[in-house]
Amino acid sequence: TQGAMVYISRGNFMEMAENLGVLIVYVAYIYKIRITKSKSIRDMVQKLKEQEGHILENADEEIRKIYMEYAESTGKIVFFYFIVGTIATVVYFARPPIENYLRQPETKYLIFPSWFPFDTNEHYWIAYSIQAAAGLLGYSYIVFQGTLYCSFLIFFVGQLHIMRHIFKNITHYISKFSDETGIPYVKAQEYFVKICIKQHQQIIRSVRSLDESVKTFLLLDFATSSLQLSLLVVQLIDGTEIIERCAQLWFLLTLCYQLVFFYWNAHEIIVQSTGIADAVFESDWYKLELPVQKLLTMVIMRAQKPMSLSIGPFYEARVDAVVSLYKAIY
């Protein structure tokens, strides 16, 4: 029905732009929901829960401190995202009744353009209630999916930060491992470094799995966000009603916040993954046995290839991708 609304309004550019923006949201989030419900994402959630439990139960105080800093940061960012999204939703929901009261139009305004099999003027509050219920459901999906994928990214950034901390203080953790297990220090060097390498490889596989699951979604999201933001800017410039502009402005801010937050953390994965090489080099690697030094050399070589998410087959998900998006909008 939303496609029909776009076709019906094709003679009025601004009305068609508004209808098209709603249609884009519908199509994009149907695809996102499908990805979120996929087996790979469900398996990843389970693995991350297990890793979190392992960190909180077995890690030393410094590692737990690093992890909790990222966990608290995630909570604050998610809460802010929830507040921004809630304000945008409330403004959109409040706009139609206020405009109907102030302007007394022949055709009453709804939350968003939509087709109903009855007269929406005669049964306005029924139509409004249906849209409000659908809007709340859609809003909950948008917030849930946005926070889920951003939480994935922050978790991996935190894991890589922990790996950097361990490699930078490798001799300290080898001594601790030797004391806890009773393995002689010389033998404990190779055992512990191999454990670290396995953990590093596990993070690489997890990031790669997430990339395979979301790279098509990121391409769709990048394209639709560009179009949505462009349409919103045009509507803001052309709009005359202050209430309408407030609603559009809050929606614009919500989209910008989501984009910047996601691509910032995706870029941080690149930075942290390549920083592992620096962490190894800054450690007391020269005090270790020669075979262990060779293992650490392999870690440095692997860290030269950064972990990253992909926007389809075209770009890496990084901060400059958002800058390119804003340039395209301009």
Image (tube, rainbow, N blue to C red):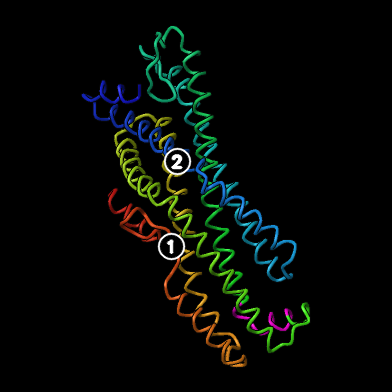
Report if residue 123 lies within the magenta region. Answer: no
Circle 1 residues within 10 Å: few <14, some 14–19, many ≥20: many
Residue at the image position 57 percent from the left and 42 percent from the top? 82
Residue drawn where x is 38% and y is 34% of the image: 27
Residue positioned 55% across, 70% down in the render: 200
Mark on residue 308?
1
Which SS class for mark 2?
helix
Q: Nearer the viewer, residue 114 or 329?
A: 114
Quadrant of res 203? bottom right
Q: Main secondary structure of the magenta part?
A: helix
Q: Amino acid at mark 1?
A: Ser
Q: Which residue is mark 2?
A: 32
CB under 8 Å between callouts 2 and 1?
A: no
59 displayed left or right of 130: right
- Near mark 2 (Cα within 10 A), the count class, few <14, some 14-19 or many ≥20, is many
Mark 2–mark 1 Cα distance, whole angstroms, equals 20 Å
Name the disc covering residue 240, or none.
none
Q: Is 214 located above or below residue 139 in the figure?
A: below
Instruction: Give the vertical position of 62 relative to 210 (above or below).
Output: below
Image spot of residue 319 (x, y percent): 40, 60
> Which amino acid lies under the numbered mark 2 shown in the image of this protein?
Lys
Instruction: Say which of 199 and 138 sits in front.
Output: 199
97 is higher (above) or lower (below) than 213:
above
Say left or right for 314 vs 205. left
Identify the element where label 1 is drawn.
Answer: loop
Tell me residue 311's x, y (percent). Answer: 36, 54
Q: Which residue is rendered at x = 31% and y = 25% of the image?
A: 3
Looking at the picture, how far across and down is residue 191, in whole percent? 65, 80
Quadrant where the image shows the N terminus: top left
Q: Nearer the viewer, residue 38 or 116?
A: 38
**Observer-nearest of 100 and 85:** 85
Give the residues in magenta.
Answer: 167-177
